[in-house]
Amino acid sequence: MSVGERDPISGHMTTGHEWNGIKELHTPVPKPVWFFLIAFTLFGVIWTLFMPSWPYGTGYFKGWLGIDQKQTVARQLEEGRADRAAWTARIEKEDFAAIKADSDLMGVVRETGHTLFGDNCAACHGTGGEGNLGYPNIVAAPMLWGDTPEIIAETITVGINGADPNTRVSQMLAFGRNQMLDRPAIQQVITYVRSLSGLEQRTEANAAAIDAGKEIFAANCVSCHGDDAKGKTDVGAPNLTDHFWIHGSSRDAIYQTVFNGRQGHMPSWGLRLSPVAIKILALYLTDLREQQHAAVGNGT
Ligand code: HEC
Ligand code: HEC
């Protein structure tokens, strides 16, 4: 048998070995494969000389470059802390107006406020603060307790019907359940309340109910909701003349409100969040509210 014979089918040379008539083809590992194998092995060995690598009994070879990931992380954390401490200190001591006027600080407020809001508030108030049934819209609706950043910070700190001893307290009375108004009277006052925001137009059919409802409202409701029904911030009673509804605007929903009363519960965040976090949230909300109003102003 001859060395260097060419296999007629595959075109490869054979090795010259033959077993029971089967000849072995000569197919060496291609050169580029050898090249990369050697190059990467060399690279690996050299890398282990420069970087922390080989373990031995009591420790490991630190590498000629002396790079230490643990120290790098610790240093980055330290730098982050120093950075944070610097702006936290400024937000803590400067007043609301000064912070609002400082675009760098407001950048921090927007970023941190967004995270704080997402983590603590969005579950009830919605990701953009737009509210859910039972939870008020806090970016576009008139505020129950007032809308300056100072007041909003106070509301967030003490909560509404919350656990803090200084909590804001509010209650929509259960006029039906407590037998202060009978069902027909409740139906009349509902018609009147819905007419205030245009949910019901005055017609011949409902004119008598609206007029009767107005009197019931004057006798029972104005002490909290105001003579003009636009709400009172000292008792946290909502404006009933706009299109924002906490508990729903259908006749059924308002019937529930007036018959059984409502007592929304907003946690006292001062018991859980730091004062500076609350300050950031109050500024964040004020900023969102201003953007919202600017957008509505431009759009109409
Ligand atoms: C468990 C649900 C819940 C969570 C969580 C929650 N809130 Fe509230 N919040 C409420 C309810 C309910 C009200 C309205 C109470 C009422 O109807 O009188 C409210 C009211 C408010 C008000 C007052 C609105 C006004 O019109 O004056 C502000 C401000 C507010 N929340 C901010 C926040 C912020 C900031 C967070 C996160 C730190 C937060 N809330 C988390 C339930 C919640
Ligand atoms: C003692 C004060 C008080 C009186 C009196 C009162 N309300 Fe209220 N009312 C509130 C408060 C506070 C709320 C908000 C409750 C909440 O969200 O937890 C409210 C909420 C409402 C709402 C729900 C608004 C929404 O956005 O869903 C309606 C409707 C309403 N009141 C109608 C009336 C009517 C009608 C009367 C008179 C028959 C009346 N209220 C009397 C305090 C009062």
Image (spheres, grey):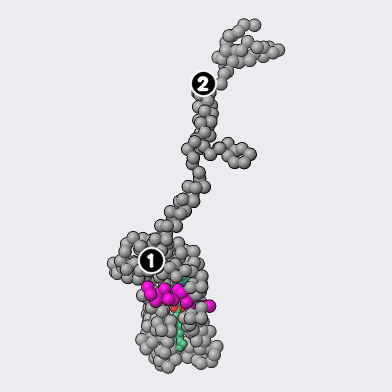
Where residue 275 appears, as percent x and y from the top left, is: 44, 70
Q: Which residue is mark 2?
A: 31
Crowding at label 1, few (<14), some or many (≥20) Cα neighbours within 10 Å? many
The quarter of the picture where residue 88 lies is bottom left
What is the span of residues highlighted in magenta in the rendered image? 149-163
Q: Main SS type for the magenta part?
A: helix
Which residue sits at x=42%, y=61%? 85
Camera-side mark, 2 or 1 = 1
Residue 271 lies, with reference to residue 228, above or below; the image says above
Q: Return the residue nearer the eye: 121 or 68.
A: 68
Q: Secondary structure at mark 1?
A: helix
Q: Which mark is residue 231?
A: none
What is the residue that sits farthest to the right in this orientation? 20
Which of the image's four quarters has the C terminus? bottom left
Q: Is residue 219 visible?
A: yes
Q: Amino acid at mark 1?
A: Ile
x and y percentages locating residue 236 in the rendered image: 43, 81
**Between 104 and 234, which is closer to the camera in this rendering?**
104
Give the structural element (helix, strand or loop) at label 2: helix
From the image, which quarter does the N terminus lie in?
Answer: top right
Instruction: Pinpoint residue 217: horizontal percent, then vertical percent.
Output: 42, 90
Q: Residue at x 50, y 86 (%)?
A: 173
Residue furthest front in the image: 58
Q: Quadrant of residue 99?
A: bottom left
Taking the spot 51% from the left edge, 81% from the top edge, the residue there is: 165
Residue 194 can be seen in this image = no
Residue behind mark 1: 91
